[in-house]
Amino acid sequence: MMSRLLFTSLFVGALALAGGCAKSEPPNTSDGADSPASTAADADSQHASAAMPESGVDYHSLANTGDYRVQHLDLDLTVDFERKVLEGEAVLQVERLTDENPPLVLDTRDLEIEQVKAGQGGDMAPVKFRLGEKDSHLGTPLEIQLPPEATSVSIAYRTSPGASGVQWLEPRQTAGKKHPFLFTQAQPTHARSFVPLQDSPQVRITYKATIRTPKALRAVMSANNDPKAEKDGVYEFEMPQPIPSYLIALAVGDLEFKPMGERTGVYAEKVLLDAAAKEFEDTESMLEATEKVYGPYRWDRYDLLILPPSFPFGGMENPRLSFITPTVIAGDKSLVALIAHELAHSWSGNLVTNASWRDLWLNEGFTTYLTNRIMQLIYGDERYRMEMALGYDDLQADLADRPDKDEIMAIDLRGRDPDEAFSNIPYEKGSLFLYELEQKVGRENFDRFLLNYFNHFSFQSITTEDFLAYLEKTLLKQYPDKLDAARVRQWIYEPGIPEGAPHPMSDAFSKLDPVRQQWLDGKIRAGDIDTQGWTFHQWKYFLDGMPEKLSAEQLRELDAAFGLTESKNNEVAFSWLMIAVRNDYQPAYARLESFLTGIGRNKFVRPLYRAMVETGKKDEAARIFENAKAGYHPLTVKVNSRVIYGDEQG
Ligand SMILES: [Zn+2]
């Protein structure tokens, strides 16, 4: 998903905190990914022990992926806004990996199963099935008795109105206010709440879908969208490249399309369309620049879908159609690192995919590294350094705050919610690790390595140990005098960051430190500070570096000089509101309430609620939350009720 970082962030901020669902026991029997399982095993042998999770095992799926592999999905779903239900049929093509005939076990969550048929090709007959016991994190296994030769399974089902991966919005929650809106968010383990399937990132499938909607609305998916498709209430899709289930995505709304370039365009509600197309007009250049360094874009078109403000993340890298929060439309392209991030996932994540959520850093660390590189290619060195420096600060903040075991890139998630993996560790520590490799072997050499890596593992799901084995055969072998296998393992398997790790810095930021200090010392007035040309990065750095406590007079002075309470940039507003909450600055409270009510992006919402609770404003937090929650995504509701009311209600 998105990244935690600043802009990029999606998930992290978002989810991370967010809380999704999965959890616990060692469910799965899946063997390695479609990847070199043997090398994975070898590489892992040094690390494997009862105390370590097994490489390649997905602890967050109940599916028996070692017995069967789903290859293809045909979906036919009707979107019922009144009942808040998706209803229809999923047909799975299944490869059998065993001569025995065990039941096929699929992942589901809160699905109502009407009928299951199985057979060969289109020749199917009803078969026995049963839903197992519900696990609060993993969902409910669907066990299907397959006839010995059956390779096709058809499941007639409907979703529940509270499906964890589907958000239904009332017209008033949209930008246009006239029509309802629906979007799905499958990562990490929510696809199972709207399709019965093997919901594991190591199972890749192709899919086709027919989506039936009210006539006024348009459906789009992570597939071959046709901007010219007539709005007739029936939409056909095909995703011919094999993708993991967490990349299946659907949205339905009063959507229009505007092209931005030959291969890029925007889908959005009409009132947002022009602003979005303008804000993100560099997307085509980003795509071309990325291809030049990391190899061809393999997904045909790259479009953006702008979601309503309740979208809980910054963005989600759904293939061919990234889902994007409208909170990054700032009017000055200052937050478009998010677009670079989602685009970069077309290589790191979507093309080469983490085999389990333990391996998330392979998705997000590589993507964060690529994001910085893309930003440099398009916007130059200074921006590159500022983005890197902010990421580094985020990482330091997380390292100060997390238990050692969660500072490990290959994180042990057994018995845990996979959302807990989405911290700055996979994103920023992962990126810093790659940056160190780049520094040591030289940028050109490292770029060549990445290009080859993406080709070598394209359309595969791989483990941390697959990566290590590959690194050993390539860079570690080529540059024995520059790289050291023990240090690489320290980065991946140990907490913290190794001594001597790079420390990205920005001159533009260093200049701000003395200015801030002079103001704090009362030597200059806020109004004397030359903020001409400051980007949001500088504002954020300037504000985030303020001491915990400021006086009422200082707050009034800053606000009067810079209009911070009214800032239109959501990142700047957020940094300011955090200061306002910590210091009980009443003049900002109306904005705080409208900010929390108007936006559902967890990266912003959660820290603000948390700061309110920590500074004795729990009642006020609860009052705003109760008003706002009808407009929030289920994940936002879940994670923030934890923050406000404590764990037991999460
Ligand atoms: Zn991401």
Image: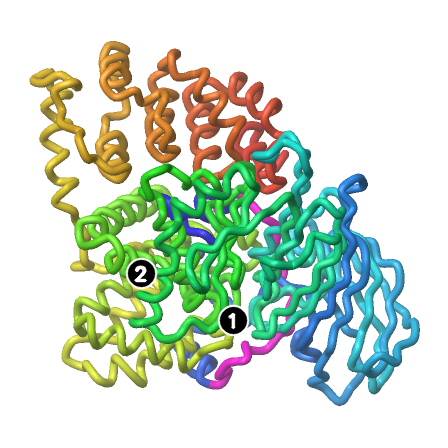
Q: Could you tell me which secondary element the residue under label 2 belongs to?
A: helix
| Residue located 66% across and 70% down the image | 207
Which image quadrant: the C terminus?
A: top right
| Residue 337, x across and y down, in percent | 35, 50
Q: Amino acid at mark 1?
A: Glu
Residue 375 vertical position relative to residue 53 in the rendered view, above or below: above
| Residue located 23% across and 14% down the image | 557
* Residue where numbered disc 2 is placed: 369
Q: Nearer the viewer, residue 356 or 517?
A: 517
Residue 283 vertical position relative to residue 520 in the rendered view, above or below: below
Of badges 1 and 2, nearer the viewer stands: 2
Q: Nearer the viewer, residue 439 or 264?
A: 264
For this view, does 410 lie left or right of residue 431? right
* Residue where numbered disc 1 is placed: 54
| Residue 158, x across and y down, in percent | 81, 53
Which residue reaches farthest right?
A: 126
Residue 29 part of the magenta segment = yes
For this view, does 21 lie left or right of residue 579? right
Highlighted range, magenta: 16-38
| Residue located 76% across and 47% down the image | 214
Q: Could you tell me which secondary element the residue under label 1 belongs to?
A: loop
Would you say the residues marked 1 and 2 are in contact, meaning their CB atoms lie under 8 Å apart? no
Q: Quadrant for ligand 1? A: bottom left
| Residue 607, x across and y down, in percent | 43, 33
Residue 18 vertical position relative to residue 113 in the rendered view, above or below: above
Decide if residue 49 is in sight here.
no
For this view, does 180 lie left or right of residue 362? right
Q: Nearer the viewer, residue 336 or 507?
A: 336
Residue 563 part of the magenta segment = no
> Magenta region's main secondary structure?
loop
Question: Where residue 270 is drawn, which disc sits there?
Answer: none
Q: Earlier in the sequence, mark 1 or mark 2?
A: 1
